[in-house]
Image (cartoon, helix red, strand yellow):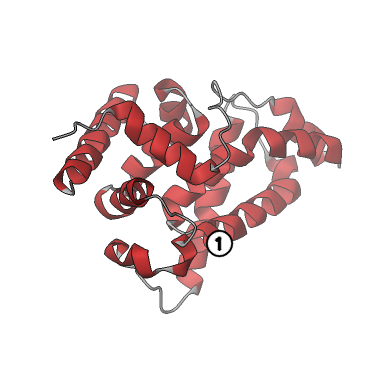
Amino acid sequence: MHYIYEGEIIMILFAFVLGDGEQLQKGLEIDEKLIKRIAKGDMDAFDILYRQSERTLYAYVLSLTKDHETTLDIMQDTYVKLISAAHLYKPMGKPLAWIFTIAKNLFYQKLRKEKNVEHMDPTDLSDDKRFSYVTDIEDRLVLEGVLKLLTQEEREIIMLYAVSGMKHKEIAENLGLNLSTTLSKYHRALKKLRDFLEGRR
């Protein structure tokens, strides 16, 4: 039996989300001054913030929605809300956590507005056109495992680590978790995915 290594799982997720061979970011630091400039109508500052945070925000929102198109919609709404609410931002040294909070609130608002929220069975991924571009069976299995097996927090941690290359300490700070909790959930999630993949072989 082929043993699935941590790096294989992470790279499969990374390749699925980006699909373009880009390298992982080595951490993400957003200058709080950008938000102050955005509050004053500086769209150049917004462009910089968007380029710096787009990939990480995508990974985070995808961990909530489990759907590419919905993720893009919520991202767009998040950036619109960020522009309109930038003047309310209180410097705390955690601008990314603030952006995550906006995104999560918008996600829950969307769920409340939808009277009949459909819960897709992840085992039906092969028939779902939203994931038709995932052609590699290994990639599809990892994605299926992420959606089906992991809790929301585990998905958030795995996706932020896999896609953004954020360090566990950064993830903990931005999700409001203890580092030990983050590490524990990360390793538990990896074990679930590894067991899932090995059981399918």
Question: Which quarter of the figure has residue 44?
Answer: top right
The answer to whether residue 100 is seen in the rendering is no
Please give the name of the residue rendered at 27% of the width and 63% of the height, measured from the top-left corner.
123
Q: Judge whether 27 appears above or below 88 on screen.
A: above
Q: Quadrant of the N terminus?
A: top left
- In the visual, does 114 lie left or right of 36? left
Q: Dot 1, crowdedness within 10 Å: few (<14), some or many (≥20)?
A: few
Q: Position of residue 181 (x, y in %)?
A: 28, 29
The answer to whether residue 1 is seen in the rendering is yes
Q: Position of residue 180 (x, y in %)?
A: 28, 23
Report how many numbered discs are placed on residues in the image: 1
Work out whether residue 33 or residue 192 is closer to the camera in this orientation and state it. 192
Q: Position of residue 2 (x, y in %)?
A: 18, 33
Question: Which quarter of the figure has residue 115?
Answer: bottom left
Please give the name of the residue rendered at 76% of the width and 33% of the height, measured from the top-left corner.
48
For disc 1, the marked residue is 69
Question: Which quarter of the figure has residue 131?
Answer: bottom left
Work out whether residue 188 or residue 17 is closer to the camera in this orientation and state it. 17
> Regarding mark 1 in the picture, which secondary structure is present there?
helix
Q: Judge whether 5 appears above or below 139 on screen.
A: above
Please give the name of the residue rendered at 25% of the width and 41% of the height, measured from the top-left corner.
193
Work out whether residue 19 or residue 43 is closer to the camera in this orientation and state it. 19
